[in-house]
Image (tube, grey):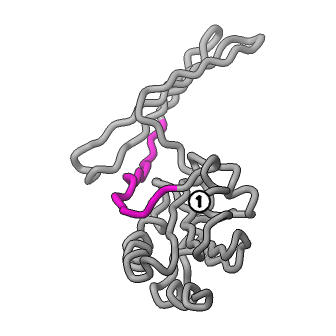
Amino acid sequence: MAAFTCTSRPPISIRSEMRIASSPTGSFSTRQMFSVLPESCGLRTRVSLSSVSKNSRVSRLRRGVICEAQETATGIPVVNDSTWESLVLKADEPVFVDFWAPWCGPCKMIDPIVNELAQQYAGKFKFYKLNTDDSPSTPSQYGVRSIPTIMIFVKGEKKDTIIGAVSKSILATSIDKFL
């Protein structure tokens, strides 16, 4: 079964940016602007305008499409680097942690499945979500290289890891091993 993962973060910005770099031959500036066009169905279009000044007048216009996913509305509590130890490692019940990011398409794909499982296993398992952009040190500590990554912890020890957007039955089978 194929699993979908996100391995790199696309450039996302909500404002115009200006970068200037100086060199002996002149200065280089880049302005990035973002817009949402009606024909793009809500996708933001990134427009970069680069120019080299002093001895030449060169400008380049580059366009690209950025898919920017919104954060999911979920009832699953959030864990971060500062609350990791108290909520996950010192938990009395087994803990299911979903490592995700708001820009990750496969993370959005499994979000409804994770929400269903959280309701199904309420009282038997604790469920948390960790945004890898907001809390980068915990994923690094546990070797998370692709998202979505699901980890199951029992008494503070990592017992299972599932990488990628997988089916509900695969996630449920992993949970059932630790009940």
Residue sitting at 63 percent across and 72 percent down? Answer: 151
Give the farthest residue toward the front: 92
- Residue 71, horizontal then vertical, whole percent: 39, 53
Residues drawn in magenta? 62-78
| In this view, 61 is above or below 9 | above
In this view, the residue in front, 178 or 4, is: 178
Give the farthest residue toward the left: 38
Quadrant (top left/top right/bottom left/bottom right) for the C terminus: bottom right
Task: State left or right for residue 135 relative to residue 128.
Answer: right
- Residue 101, horizontal then vertical, whole percent: 51, 56
Task: State left or right for residue 106 relative to residue 151.
Answer: left
Residue where numbered disc 1 is placed:
87
Kind of residue at disc 1: Leu
Task: State left or right for residue 137 relative to residue 65.
Answer: right
Say what secondary structure mark 1 lies in. helix
Please tell me whether residue 29 belongs to the stretch shown in magenta. no
Q: Residues within 10 Å of mark 1 (few under 14, many from 20)?
A: some
Residue sitting at 28 percent across and 50 percent down? Answer: 42
Task: State left or right for residue 12 relative to residue 152.
Answer: left
Give the farthest residue toward the top: 54
| In this view, 61 is above or below 52 | below
The image quarter containing residue 75 is bottom left
The image quarter containing residue 73 is bottom left
Magenta stretch, overall SS: loop
Residue sitting at 55 percent across and 57 percent down? Answer: 130
- Residue 150, horizontal then vertical, whole percent: 59, 72
Residue sitting at 49 percent across and 25 percent down? Answer: 17
